[in-house]
Amino acid sequence: MSKALTVMELRALKGVRQISFVQVAREEEAIAASEAGMDMIGTAFIPEHAHFARAVPQTHFQYGLPWGKHADATEALRDSMAAMNAGAQSIYCGMSPAVVEVLAREGVPVICHVGLVPPKATWTGGFKAVGKSAEQALHLWQEVKDFENAGAFAAEMEVIPARLAGEMTKRTSMLTISLGSGGD
C-alpha cells in the first residue's frame, strides 16, 4: 500500500505531472477512487462524511468547509482543525484571503477557489465562464496573488478559459485544480 501524498510532495509535482483529483459523496466512492490511484480525494466536511479520510489513508484527502456554515475565521479554523483531526491532509476554503490567512498561519494547508464560485455567482454575472475580458482576467490574477500571499498552497480554478488558467498556473507557486479550465 502506498502512502498519501503530503502537501510538500504535491507541490514538488507542480509542472512535473498532472495530479488527479475527484470529489466524492459516499465512502464507497472514496474507496473506489483510492483504489483507482487518484492522487487527491475531496468531500464536504459534514458529520456523515467525517470518517471518509480514515477509509482511504493511502490517498491525500481534502475536506471542504461547507459554504455558509462559518461566520468568521475563528469558526472556519475550528472546523478546519476538526477536519485535520479526522484525517484530512488539506482543507478547501471558499472564503476570503483574510480567512485563508488565519487558517494558513495556524498550519492548515488550504485550497482556495477562484473563477466561478457557485455560491458567489451573482458577483460574476451568473453561471458562466469568468475571465473572458481583460478586466476580468486581471481581477482573477489579483485574486490568485491575494490567495497565494495569504498562504494557500492550491487554488481551485473553476470555469476559467483554459488559456488564461494555464498562464496563471505558470505564474503562481500554488497548485491549480481545474474544473472546466486548464491547470496543473
Image (cartoon, helix red, strand yellow):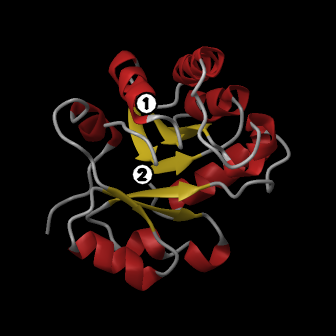
Residue at left 68%, top 49%?
A: 127
Of the pair 53 and 180, the residue shown nearer to us:
180
Quadrant in the rendering for residue 102: top right
Nearer to us of marks 2 and 1 is 1
Of the pair 105 and 126, the residue shown nearer to us:
126
Q: Can residue 86 be seen at all in this image of the molecule?
A: yes
x and y percentages locating residue 79 in the rendered image: 68, 54
Of the pair 18 and 88, the residue shown nearer to us:
18
Under tag 1, what secondary structure? helix
Please, which residue is most extreme toward the right here? 71
Q: Which residue was labeled with disc 2?
A: 89
Q: Which mark is residue 182?
A: none
Residue at left 63%, top 26%?
A: 101
Q: Which residue was labeled with disc 1?
A: 165
Q: How many marks?
A: 2
Q: Residues within 10 Å of mark 2 (few under 14, many from 20)?
A: many
Residue at left 53%, top 48%?
A: 91
Quadrant in the rendering for residue 68: bottom right
Indicate the quadrant containing the N terminus: top left, top right, bottom left or bottom right: bottom left
Which comes sooner in the sequence, label 2 or label 1?
A: 2
Residue type at numbered disc 2: Gln
Q: Can residue 109 be seen at all in this image of the molecule?
A: no
x and y percentages locating residue 166 in the rendered image: 36, 28
Indicate the quadrant containing the C terminus: top left, top right, bottom left or bottom right: top left
